[in-house]
Every structure is written in structure tokens, then in C-alpha cells.
Image (cartoon, rainbow, N blue to C red):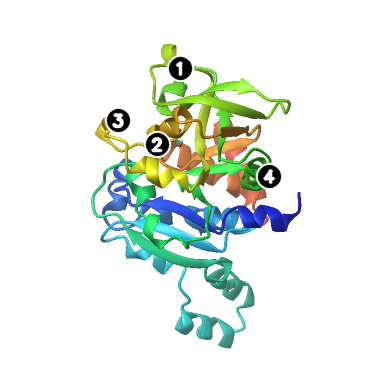
Amino acid sequence: MSESSARRSFRSAVVPAAGLGTRFLPTTKTVPKELLPVVDTPGIELVAEEAAQAGAERLLIVTSPGKDAVAAHFAPQPALEEMLKERGKDALLAKVRRAPDLLEVATVTQHEPKGLGHAVGCVADVLDDDEEAVAVLLPDDLVLPTGVLTRMAQVRDQHGGTVLCAFDIPGPEISAYGVFDVADTADADVKRVHGMVEKPPADEAPSTYAAAGRYLLDRAIFDALGRITPGAGGELQLTDAVALLIEEGHPVHVVVHRGGRHDLGNPGGYVRAFVDFALQHPDYGDDLRSWLAARLEG
Ligand code: G1P
């Protein structure tokens, strides 16, 4: 599969970033959680980079009133850039330019917190007529190594319809996720989805395969989103719209991702991600590793 055919699968990547970030209070009184740094780079920039690598040309950030700083991170800062240029700070200038140079960014406002399904539905009107599919990346989820979206686009080229990313989560934590009812295909890492349920009790989960924050949604999802009613937590759930598409015979597959994952959505997961990225960082990795080793012995 060439990169260009994966590219044709979608042009826009939706990043829902309208949440209040209550798990990160008090910081999120003024700082959107999507801008919290993983070492020195906001989580949302890492996610935007992944989307661009997979061929997205446009990032649609679904935001809420008061979170303008998220989109501002992707805007050029001419005065700062000029100053860095004059001072010969080329490495810093490259860092500052990275986000604005990745892809085109537009924002869509979600005025009320009515759930992930509602947030995704907010972009329906800004898609171009010829956009048959749209990618969704949840900025809380870092899926590593990157590349799963490209694989998902290949699966859509082969099977059509909607393709999601699944992680194998054996154990009670499965109840924190959307869970798939699946059947095998000829490819061990691609499963056909026969049903999907949001946050089931662990003993009622239809499998150990959970939705992990990467979606390649056929445009039909927007019609389904318009027909669902509030589900788990009283919210309009993306899971319920996918389940409705399945019921109506629309093909849905998952790519089982065997790599790693970080959940930036809570302080515990965020700390792990920060340490993991810092350990791999050329400037900070060695020092952190020896400090941690000594700290853990002490
Ligand atoms: C959302 C989705 C859920 C998915 C999860 C992945 O839940 O509703 O289906 O498994 O993201 O992180 P949230 O974590 O926002 O409650």
C-alpha cells in the first residue's frame, strides 16, 4: 500500500479537546490539559505529529470556550521567532516552528460537554463534500510506536467502512473502555467487529479488546451520531454510534495494536509518559536514569 493511497483515506484528523480536565485540577484552572508537557512538548503536539505522519492535512480541534490556548499553540509567533533568529538560537526556533508547520489547524467549538460522540459530531459541517472518512485521535492516548493510523487506513482500503484501534486488555481495567465483540479474519491483527459496548462491567465485557483512542470513521458516522441517545454516564457516546453502524450492516474492523500506550488523561498515567519520554531523551535520559536508580535504592 503506497503512502498516497493511505493519504486518500482521510484528510482531516479530529482531536476532541473540550474537556474540563478535572483530574488535573488545580493546574487546569488556567492551563488546558492538552498543553501539559511531555518533557518539553505538549501532548497535543505529539498527537498532531502522529496525524500528520499518517497523511492528515488538517487538524480539527474540538474545543470549549476558554481553551483558546490549545489552538494558539499551533499558530506562528512572529515576534518570538524573530528574536530567536536574531540570537542565533536555531534549535529553539525549530522547536517553536514545529507545531505551526505540521498541518493546517482549525477549531470547532463544543458549547456543552455532552460526551465524545457529541464532540466528534461537531465537525460534521466543516468537512468538505469529498471527505469520505475522518480520523479521530484522543489526545489523552499516546499509542506507541506511532503508525497505527496508517495501518488502519490500509485496512479501510481493503475492507471499506470504519476501522478502529484496539488494545488487548485482559483484566478488570477493561471496564474503563469501549469494548469490541470481534471475530477473527485471515490477519491475526485485524478483527471484524460484531458489536461494541461502552464501559461494560468487566464480567460482561464481550472480549479483552478495548478501543484505544484512534478511530478512522466512515462519514456515515455523522448520520449515526445524529440518531443516538445518551448512553454510559448520560453522555452521547461515540461507541454507541459505531454500534449502530454495525447493527445496520456497515463494516467495522479493528487493528489490534501490540505496542505500548500511555494515558495522559490522569496524573498517574501522565507521570509514566513523562518519565518514559524523558528516559529516551538525548539531553535528560542518562541523568534521569542514574538519579532514578539511586532514588529507588534509597
Ligand atoms: C473514551 C471512549 C472509550 C475508549 C477510551 C480510550 O473514554 O469513550 O470507548 O475506550 O476513550 O481511552 P474516556 O476515557 O474518555 O472515558
The mark nearer the N terminus, 4 or 2, is 4
Residue 146 in the image: state x and y as whole percent.
64, 47
Residue located beneath label 4 in the image: 154
Instruction: Please state which amino acid type lies under the numbered disc 4.
Output: Gln
Residue 205 is labelled as 1
Indicate whether 230 appears above or below 97: above
Task: Find residue 154 and report its image quarter.
Answer: top right
Question: Dot 1, how many residues are within 10 Å of its Cα: few (below 14), some (14-19), or many (20+)?
Answer: many
Q: Check disc 2 and report its element: helix, strand or loop.
A: helix
127 or 150: which is nearer to us? 127
The mark nearer the N terminus, 2 or 3, is 3
| Structural distance between the alpha carbons of marks 4 and 1 | 28 Å
Say if mark 1 contacts mark 2, CB within 8 Å.
no
Instruction: Please state which amino acid type lies under the numbered disc 2.
Output: Ala
Residue 241 is labelled as 2
Residue 26 is labelled as none
Please indicate, yes or no, whether residue 117 appears anywhere in the rendered image: yes
Instruction: Please state which amino acid type lies under the numbered disc 3.
Output: Gly
User: Is ligand 1 less than 8 Å from the beta carbon at label 3?
Assistant: no
Question: Dot 4, how many residues are within 10 Å of its Cα: few (below 14), some (14-19), or many (20+)?
Answer: many
| Structural distance between the alpha carbons of marks 1 and 2 | 18 Å
| Structural distance between the alpha carbons of marks 3 and 4 | 31 Å
| Structural distance between the alpha carbons of marks 2 and 3 | 10 Å
Q: Residue furthest front?
A: 248
Residue 251 in the image: state x and y as whole percent.
55, 34
Residue located beneath label 3 in the image: 231
Task: Find residue 259 and report its image quarter.
Answer: top right
- Which image quarter has ligand 1? top left
Q: Check disc 1 and report its element: helix, strand or loop.
A: loop
Residue 99 is left or right of residue 176, and the answer is right
Question: Dot 3, how many residues are within 10 Å of its Cα: few (below 14), some (14-19), or many (20+)?
Answer: some
Residue 296 in the image: state x and y as whole percent.
56, 32
